[in-house]
Amino acid sequence: MELLRTPDDRFADLPGFPFEPRYADVADGLRMAYVEAGPAGGEPVVLLHGEPSWSFLYRHVMTELAAAGLRAIAVDFVGFGRSDKPAEIADHTYTGHVEWTRALLFDALGLSGVTIVGQDWGGLIGLRIAAEHPERIARIVAANTGLPTGDIPMPEVWHRFKEAVLKAPVLDIARLVQAGCKSELPPEVRAAYDAPFPDESYKAGPRAMPGLVPITPDDPAAPANRAAWQILTTLDRPFLVAFSDGDPITSDMAPILVKSISGASGLVHPVIKGAGHFLQEDAGGELGRQIAGFVTST
């Protein structure tokens, strides 16, 4: 597997993101990056981003969690952010991403009692990890995400997105993030989303991810996701559903999660107002406060 590593100078002067990068090897010299905020002894809250963003997305959330005395850990998936980037689309598999992330959280960092927060692909990976390793998990937060099995059709807007990402001669990462936000991103924030990708050769991860979502019942990842659903529906861990009010891709999943997951019963599930798919950008402070309140009250 050919690995690319984004030069450090691409990440100079990131707006509102003063956190020092940390690294760990997760497989055969493959390095993943993450950042932390808050006390080292605080309860760990793992923040998992979506496509095509990176841990920068959680900067406002991290500030709120740290202020509440929690240890916020925001991960860069393989192929994103400061993590190493396999050069070929075929290098990326759903199973591989779950295993790489698991290895970072549990083998390298030795985390337990984790509150896992997933948005977009962060949920597809995070919910699998939570279901497969419940002994490590204290709570779960699902934010504009789901766990598809291919048994329910994806919305047409998602299929258009998938085709655009795969076929675009030049994949405009910042434009894709902006398209998922209600607010207008300043130029320096858009530049931060482009920073991990000096040229097209670094973008196999973002190009691969839409194609890894199970969209047919016989998808290779569908059985593992169905098994995860069975575990999550009966798992006795508090489960918060914190969706925005303006995401055309995942909005239908919120009531399904609330109804299906036993850990969601009896909780007040917030709707983050005025936010799009990337609710961390549009309302990161509010999302952070909701997560902090959830962790400290359960």
Image (cartoon, grey):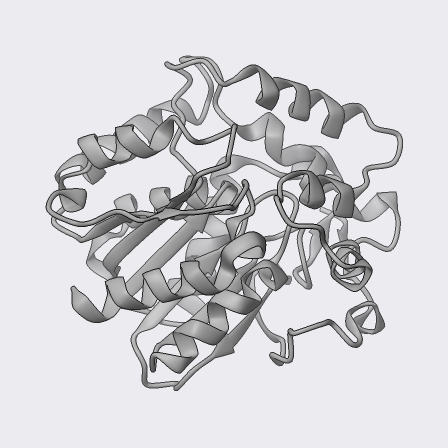
Q: Nearer the viewer, residue 241 or 282?
A: 282
Residue at 27 percent of width and 34 percent of height: 257
Residue at 18 percent of width and 44 percent of height: 264
Q: Where is residue 283 in the image (x, y as percent from the top left)?
A: 51, 56
- Specify whether residue 113 is in view: no
Q: Position of residue 122 (x, y in %)?
A: 47, 47
- Whether residue 33 sits left or right of residue 61 in the image: it is right
Q: Nearer the viewer, residue 129 or 269?
A: 269
Residue at 40 percent of width and 26 percent of height: 148
- Specify whether residue 192 is in view: yes
- Whether residue 204 sits left or right of residue 78 in the image: it is right
- Whether residue 179 sits left or right of residue 66 in the image: it is right
Q: Position of residue 20 (x, y in %)?
A: 62, 81
Q: Position of residue 194 (x, y in %)?
A: 79, 54
Residue 26, compared with residue 132, is above or below; it is below
Q: Residue 258's quadrant in the figure?
A: top left
Residue at 63 percent of width and 76 percent of height: 21
